[in-house]
Amino acid sequence: MLTAEERARGCRLGAVLRQVRGGRSMVEVASVAGVPVETLRKIEAGRVPTPAFFTVAAIAAALDLSLADLAVRVEPSAGERVRASA
């Protein structure tokens, strides 16, 4: 079973990838990343909260997004950290 924090992190990851993808189509990004479009769709929707590292790395590379930048963007905000610890 996943924790609430793991599910929340998966949702944040999906939101960041969707935001960075911008106007590019899912088909285009998935093709460049070498992953099925349905995998990208599920990750962006938060339905795969803990995707494989190499899948995330391939998608990030297709979006010209470094893994370091992605990690920073996926970190919970200060408000989210306070709520999670309460």
Image (cartoon, grey):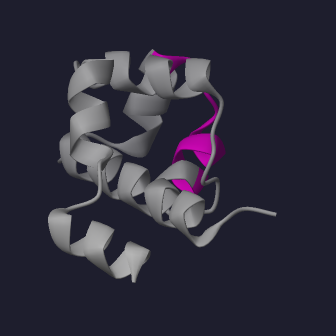
Q: Nearer the viewer, residue 27 or 9?
A: 9
Q: Position of residue 57 (x, y in %)?
A: 46, 19
Q: Nearer the viewer, residue 41 or 76?
A: 76
Quadrant of the image occupied by residue 61? top left
- 70 relative to 8, above or below: above
Question: What residue sits 33% from the left and 43% below the top?
Answer: 25
Q: Quadrant of the C terminus?
A: bottom left
Quadrant of the image occupied by residue 49? bottom right
Q: What secondary structure is the stretch in magenta mostly built from?
A: helix
Is residue 41 in the magenta section? yes
Q: Nearer the viewer, residue 34 or 74?
A: 74
Q: Position of residue 48 (x, y in %)?
A: 64, 53
Q: Position of residue 69 (x, y in %)?
A: 20, 28
Left or right side of 79 for 34: right
Residue 23 in view of the camera: no
Left or right side of 30 for 77: left
- 18 relative to 55, above or below: below
Question: What residue sits 43% from the left and 17% below the top?
Answer: 32
Question: What residue sits 40% from the left and 49% below the top?
Answer: 13
- 51 relative to 57, above or below: below
Quadrant of the image occupied by residue 29? top left
Is residue 86 in the magenta section? no
Residue interval drawn in magenta: 33-42
Residue 86 in view of the camera: yes
